[in-house]
Image (cartoon, coloured by chain):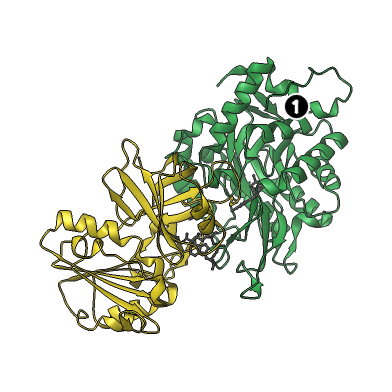
Chain colours: A green, B yellow
Amino acid sequence: MVERLATTCGPLELANPVLAASGTFGYGDSFERFWPLSLLGGFVTKTLFVAPRDGNPAPRVAETSAGMLNSIGLANVGWEAFVRDKAPRVNALRGRSRMIVNVAGNAPEEFGEIAARVEADRDVVRCDAVEVNVSCPNVKEGGTNIGCHIGQFRDAVRRVRAATTLPIFVKLSPNVADVVPFALCAADEGAEGVSLVNTLYGMQIDTERRAPVLGTGSGGLSGPAILPVGVHWVFKVRAALPELPILGIGGITTWRDALQYLMAGAQAVQVGTASFVNPHACPDILAGLDRWCASRNVAIRDVVGAAHRVGEAVEEPVWTG
Amino acid sequence: MNPGAVRTLPLVEVEDVSKGTYWLRFHAPAGFACDPGHFFMLSSPENGAPFLGRPLSIGDVHGERFGFLVRALGGATAWFRTLPVGSPIRLVGPLGRPFLQPERSVHCMVAGGIGLAPFFYLARRLRATQPGARIELRYGERSADAHAPLMEAEGELFDVVERFTDDGSLGARGTVVDGLDDRLGDPNAAWYACGPHAMLRALARRLDEAGATDVQFSLEERMACGFGVCQACIVPNRSGKPRYRLLCMDGPVLDPREVAW
Ligand SMILES: Cc1cc2nc3c(=O)[nH]c(=O)nc-3n(C[C@H](O)[C@H](O)[C@H](O)COP(=O)(O)OP(=O)(O)OC[C@H]3O[C@@H](n4cnc5c(N)ncnc54)[C@H](O)[C@@H]3O)c2cc1C
Ligand SMILES: Cc1cc2nc3c(=O)[nH]c(=O)nc-3n(C[C@H](O)[C@H](O)[C@H](O)COP(=O)(O)O)c2cc1C
Ligand code: FES
């Protein structure tokens, strides 16, 4: 695409700032029927564990006001099948688009194990970075969320860092009082960047059945409803750690939503739930960003963090209806 | 429309059929093609409420129009009914695996409630490709006022329509599953069914006991994407390996003997 959309997120050179988010893009080849993968700045795979997982019982999704709840339960094909069946196919399709492999485990030690597998297979898989999904329950510790406990969080990130030299992005949970200490911890442990946010805890109750709708009771909230939450935390992390590369996630459905994240301080964004409803969401957002940059005669790099530069001269606001 | 096209089309017609049930019709754009049993995800292009797309089976393709037979059960299905003609609707599809159409002398369709939806188009296709075959519809509803009239379809699409109601207020009393005796065990029959889970489960057992082999059910499960990425639409697999299958990719039409009911 055009040079004005090019951006850099830490070690990642991106042709444009639009990536597809984990769990909403399969392993990279699910949208081939709609548009070519090579259009994207990059994409993040579904969370991979060492062993395959079946995931949770149905129902696994529910619609909410301007969003959805999911309790998929990190169903995935497992590392071996990914390396054998998915990666070669996706590599043939992706062109310059960056592949980020998202990994997790049921306890901090398992994060180290999966990271070691990624490192061992890195020449076959040819991924550009690893995203660490700490927002899953620690099965060993009775299901507490690893990403919400700074001790377990540090342990998991440290083990991943020790196991691989690939760039690491730690995906942060918004289900904490303050996300900033977790971003700081990730940076301390040598992560190249952070991705935020993952889904927010939520529940919906079927008032006729007098029971939760989701098979697991609670789930993760995503979609337009969480846009301001993600923008808030990206802004706060950027303010506290201006040098830390950020991939902004949460509720992006339009190019203007993406622009909010960039201005809050993310170098690039990930689009999730929106692609379920409109499979063309990513290319539509890209086209919108390109039009906006052209009309304002700016490059994407110029607007990253713009909302922090209060007092800096900006063009008179123009009412565009 | 290639498999998986995304199109925003204006609503051309809304026609009420019976209590709570209506047709949503569109003009078929150039290149539109789909098979009986395929489904589409319908949503608002304005990212409004409802937010997620809703799966609907292709109801009929006839002349220059295609349509969906919809029952208002909740937020989205009630909302579609309120849309004025001309409203833009986003359609993603056709999606999923459609019905196979084996060559048989008898085609038996069994519908429970809004499970009637896919059978107009299936019957229309079978009429065209197997003009000599007999097409039977067994159609059950809870009550008489929910029954779709089917005046034109009877004769044109179906050789016979047998109706059932739980209370006997229209047609035979009982469920469609009670009304199969004359056909059970017919080795020339192909079976197609769509309806509530409990009905399909009971029907699967009856057909299995009768030794029917040519059986296809169109199932329902909650969906967020409709094309295999969200992992929402799981159906427990009889063999257990894998434990679940995705209804939007492997279905919605499945052999009931492969499902762990
Ligand atoms: C492949 C497929 C084809 C379908 N074809 C048709 C069709 O041709 N005509 C038609 O009227 N309906 C069809 N359905 C069902 C239709 O998708 C649901 O009725 C609709 O999604 C409910 O949305 P809502 O917002 O109106 O209801 P909600 O308020 O979400 O729910 C109302 C009720 O419907 C149930 N429900 C919610 N989502 C689904 C779902 N995806 N499948 C089944 N039940 C659901 C809920 O549990 C609840 O009991 C089909 C479903 C599938 C999976
Ligand atoms: C159905 C579904 C599955 C998801 N699966 C994963 C996953 O496997 N790993 C992960 O890190 N995030 C997962 N996510 C979270 C998204 O990547 C994203 O962080 C979140 O949905 C917020 O962005 P959105 O509002 O654009 O969807 C999932 C989200 C949804 C809706
Ligand atoms: S509906 Fe998303 S995977 Fe089937």
Circle 1 — which element?
loop
Choose top left, top right, bottom left or bottom right for residue A237.
Answer: top right
Q: Image check: B192 left or right of A156?
A: left
Choose top left, top right, bottom left or bottom right for residue A168.
Answer: top right
Quickly name the residue at label 1.
A304
Q: Is mark 1 within 8 Å of ligand 2?
A: no
Q: Residue at x 32, y 56 (%)?
A: B98
Q: Chain of mark 1?
A: A
- Quick one: quadrant of the C terminus of chain B? bottom left
Q: Residue furthest top?
A: A297
Q: Residue furthest right?
A: A311
Q: Give coordinates of residue B43: x percent, y percent.
A: 51, 48
Q: Give coordinates of residue A5: x percent, y percent.
A: 63, 22
Q: Nearer the viewer, residue A290 or B240?
A: A290
Residue A107 makes an appearance in the image: no
Q: Image check: A314 left or right of A254?
A: right
Q: Residue at x 84, y 31 (%)?
A: A242
Q: Nearer the viewer, residue A3 or A119?
A: A3
Q: Image check: B140 left or right of A94?
A: left
Crowd around label 1: few <14 · some 14–19 · many ≥20 (10 Å): many
